[in-house]
Image (cartoon, helix red, strand yellow):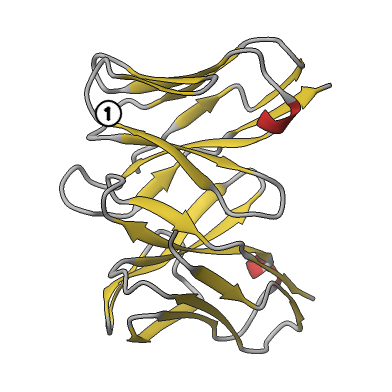
């Protein structure tokens, strides 16, 4: 089983603070996806990173793919209550083709106003 | 935006009864998936489909069967529901152009009593 380890499991911060969450594996990813899930809803795709060292920005969210493609991070600047949710990373079950995704257990973020 | 709906949204059923959950999509996507989400386990793949009548097992397929007789519908059946199958079930489709990222339905909360 190709495990994805996400840390921290839980994070509670004040509005306006910065934070980083992590997604790690012992094996190389072909690509990695980040999702956010709000209570009572399905996860929503935020970004896909493909190239080692790649950095993608989505407003106040910055996603980085490690140079060795074994880890990824999500940094949120000046967090807002609307950022509250479960953040999931996911990788392909196998490197080739459109194989199903394997998900990490997520980081549950709470941003307090 | 991909249209994907799950029904029912909530269901309570008794141990030993059969249950069928439905996933319906409106845009002829080839790949469809069923996951369950449980505290401490995250999202786990039950079954998936790569075309009409083409399905395969995921990591937690025991006690579940699927059918896909039309492109737009992917059905998940619990042959004889058990309390361990109490969970939130998500259907997803795989969308080309986002590195085959997923679009999820809103989920079905199933309680087996």
Q: Which residue is drawn at 61% across and 89% down?
A: B18
B98 in relation to A56, above or below: below
Callout 1 secondary element: loop
Q: Which residue bears the numbered disc 1?
A: A27
* Quadrant hosting residue B8: bottom right
Question: What is the residue that sits farthest to the top in this orientation?
Answer: A17
Between B51 and A16, the residue placed more toward the observer is A16
Residue A79 lies, in percent from the top left, at 67, 18
Give residue B103's position: percent from left, percent from top. 45, 56
- Residue drawn at x 39%, y 84% as measured from the top left: B67
Task: Residue A72: name its quadrant.
Answer: top left
Left or right of A52? Residue A42 is right
**B43 above or below B91?**
above
Residue in the image at 32% along x and 74% along y: B28
In the image: residue B68, left or right of residue B46: left
Host chain of mark 1: A
Question: What quarter of the picture does the N terminus of chain A occupy?
Answer: top left
Query: Total label count?
Result: 1
Q: Is residue B5 above or below residue A25?
A: below
Q: Where is residue A90 in the image (x, y as percent from the top left)?
A: 41, 40
Residue A56 in the image: above or below residue B73 = above
Residue B83 screen position, x and y as percent: 71, 71
Q: Can you say which quadrant of the picture contains the C terminus of chain A?
A: top right
Q: Who's the residue at 75% across and 82% down the image?
A: B13
């Amino acid at each position: 089983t190709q495990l994805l380890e996400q840390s921290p499991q839980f994070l509670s911060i004040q509005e306006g603070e910065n934070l980083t969450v992590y997604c790690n594996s012992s094996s190389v990813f072909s690509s990695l996806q980040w999702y956010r899930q709000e209570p009572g809803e399905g996860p929503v795709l935020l970004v896909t990173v493909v190239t080692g060292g790649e950095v993608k920005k989505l407003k106040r969210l910055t996603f980085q793919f490690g140079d060795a493609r074994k880890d990824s991070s999500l940094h949120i600047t000046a967090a807002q209550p609307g950022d509250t949710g479960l953040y999931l990373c996911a990788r392909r079950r196998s490197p080739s083709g459109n194989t199903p995704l394997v998900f990490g257990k997520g980081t549950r973020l709470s941003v307090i106003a | 935006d991909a249209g994907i709906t799950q029904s029912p949204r909530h269901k309570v059923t008794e141990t030993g009864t059969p249950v069928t959950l439905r996933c319906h999509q409106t845009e002829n996507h080839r790949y469809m998936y069923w996951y369950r989400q449980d505290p401490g386990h995250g999202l786990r793949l039950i079954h998936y489909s790569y075309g009409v009548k083409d399905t395969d097992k995921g990591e937690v397929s025991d006690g579940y069967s699927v059918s896909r007789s039309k492109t737009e519908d992917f059905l998940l059946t619990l042959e004889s529901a058990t309390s361990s199958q109490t969970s939130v079930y998500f259907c997803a489709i795989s969308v080309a152009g986002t590195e085959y990222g997923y679009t999820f339905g809103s989920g079905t909360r199933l309680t087996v009593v």
